[in-house]
Amino acid sequence: MFCFSLRGMDSLTLRVVNLMHFFTNIDLYFGDLLLTYDYSVDDTKCCSSDLLTYAGESKLDMSFSLVSDVLDHELPLADGFDGKHYHDETFVNDVKVKGLASEWNVELDNTDTITWLNAIRKYDTFSTYDGDFSNLSGIYGDNKDNLKQLSSELRITSPSGDKFEYQGGLYYYYQEMHTVGRKSMLEAIQKTFGGGVLVPEGGIFNTDDNLYETWSYAAFGQSTWIINDKTRLTGGLRWTKEKKARVGTQITTLAHPELHEGTPEFINAPPIMGPPVCEDQERVRRDLSGTLRLRYFQSENLMWYASVSRGFKSGGYNQLRTPADIDPDTVREDSCHTSLGNEFDDEKSLNYELGWKGSWMAKRLQVNGTLFLTNYKDFQALALDASGSTQIRNAGSLRSSGLEMDVIFALSYELNMGLGLAYNKTEYTDFDKAVCTTAVAVQEAREAGTAAFVYICEADLKGEELDNAPEWTVSTWFQYEKPWKNQNNRWFSRLEYNYSDEFFLEQDLDPNVKNDATHLVNLRLGIAETDNKWEATLWGRNLLDEEYLVTGFDIAVFSGYAGLQAPPVTYGLAFRYRLD
């Protein structure tokens, strides 16, 4: 099978799959080998965020209004949904991804199956962006990431239908990631920050260079006991050992050293500047997680189940420094400061589920549902703090509970409908080290009589909701299909409606970056071959032209807020052809 797609003139995706059957008449041990290779290139000028408003506080005491006055520079109107961008730097995204995977299956004499999975992937990207999201010459940034991954899994699986069914195996994973990021502090900052005297003439560069390595080893096993015709009990365990290492530096340098004598000492004011930081860290963790699941088949059309499982998500290191990460008393011979840690811990969860899967009316109606409760310990909460650093912080605990339902109903031979409903109540039960809103941080710093960019502000979010987690979501669709002209072709239409409750976009629950409830309507009309050899579709998305954000955040250096606008009403025509 060969698949090829081209989007515009700057994006290419290629996928090749070659199925190789080794001879199976040699004691049946050579089995089947599936090789998969994929390669994709994406070189686009996107995706710039929209400036929502200039208003707001600045931890660095550089509001847009102040910078505008100092530079005698007129700022255009800020409207996050007018489709206009006023950046003075180009957003570029150059991504290359390639990978090779293999799957080898061998059936043994006792009908057990051995499967050996291997994969290697390489990911290279270079991106540039305007860090102040305005037409001011404030921040230019670029990032270069090189990622290599290698994984291998060997497992044995018993045939189905026996009194005991089992699966077990070993897993290995290695990852190497080299990241180089640079932020250039330009004219608007040089002339404004600290009254125009703290940033040297010509501007400065902040460069972070980090090498991350991960080694992961696991052994796993699962067994199902078929107690009787109606009852099945499944249990599984997974033991994991993981090692992570990081070596890196974060250094502030002069953009034009020829304009200065010697190298100045930079104050600790992320993300603009700071003393040099050197990281050489390593962590090793072990974990034992498992699951227990009971299924009861009340009838041929109705199955109930209950499960309890323990989850594990490994910790790691935050990449960029914050004011709290610098140890002023620890300086190496090369004048490099060591970090106070900048590390986040493992996340563990305990999940309970009670649900059912059923069908009625000769299977024309299918209804599936799940009640769930999940308790997290050391939940990894992602935030963009007011210094512009993306940080993961461990919340003490978080609880998530709710209901998920899926309904499919065949109204007739040609007409089907579906409904998806989810209620999810999330609440921090312990989180006293959350990120403050910029307004709160600035206010507390003023009351403490210190500069806001060095003041450590932490909020207590106990009893508050999780960001990016709407309480209610609903999706429903109607699809109509009918033969067209002859039995070899068909025409179809699909109408979709999706609802999402309001939710915050940032961990600090700042009301300035909050999505209201959204109502999305999509429509597809098309013609296709019955065997899906080809398909032509006319589609429209967000037909009500709802305005909402995919992301939203504080503008780190200046004031105000920016966000990435979701696509407005969009129409298109697509054609797909399968090469056999």
Image (cartoon, rainbow, N blue to C red):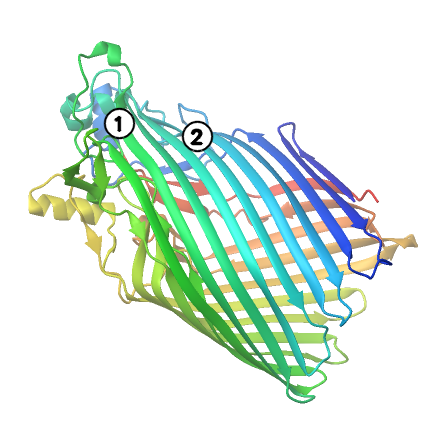
Residue 287 appears at what percent x and percent y? 42, 64
Q: What residue type is labelled 1?
A: Thr
Question: Disc 1 and disc 2: Cα gap in Å?
Answer: 29 Å
The residue closer to the viewer here, 185 or 472, is 185
**Can residue 558 be seen here?**
no
Where, quadrant-wise, is the N terminus in this rendering? Answer: top right
Residue 110 appears at what percent x and percent y? 76, 72
> Of helix, strand and loop, which one carries label 2?
loop
Mark linked to residue 85: 2
| Relative to 267, 286 lies left or right | right
Q: Earlier in the sequence, mark 1 or mark 2?
A: 2
Residue 89 appears at what percent x and percent y? 41, 24
Q: Which residue is drawn at 23% across and 22% down?
A: 190
The residue closer to the viewer here, 394 or 186, is 394
Mark 1 vs mark 2, foreground winner is 1
Q: Residue at x 67, y 40 (%)?
A: 38
Q: Residue 385, relative to residue 230: is it above or below?
A: above
Furthest-right residue in view? 486
Q: In which quarter of the image is residue 97?
A: top right
The residue closer to the viewer here, 445 or 268, is 268
| Relative to 262, 473 lies left or right | right
Query: Label 1, on which residue?
Result: 252
Q: Residue 524, relative to residue 262: is it above or below?
A: below
The residue closer to the viewer here, 193 or 76, is 193
Q: Residue at x 46, y 69 (%)?
A: 289
Q: How crowded is mark 1: few (under 14 residues within 10 Å), some or many (20 or more)?
A: many
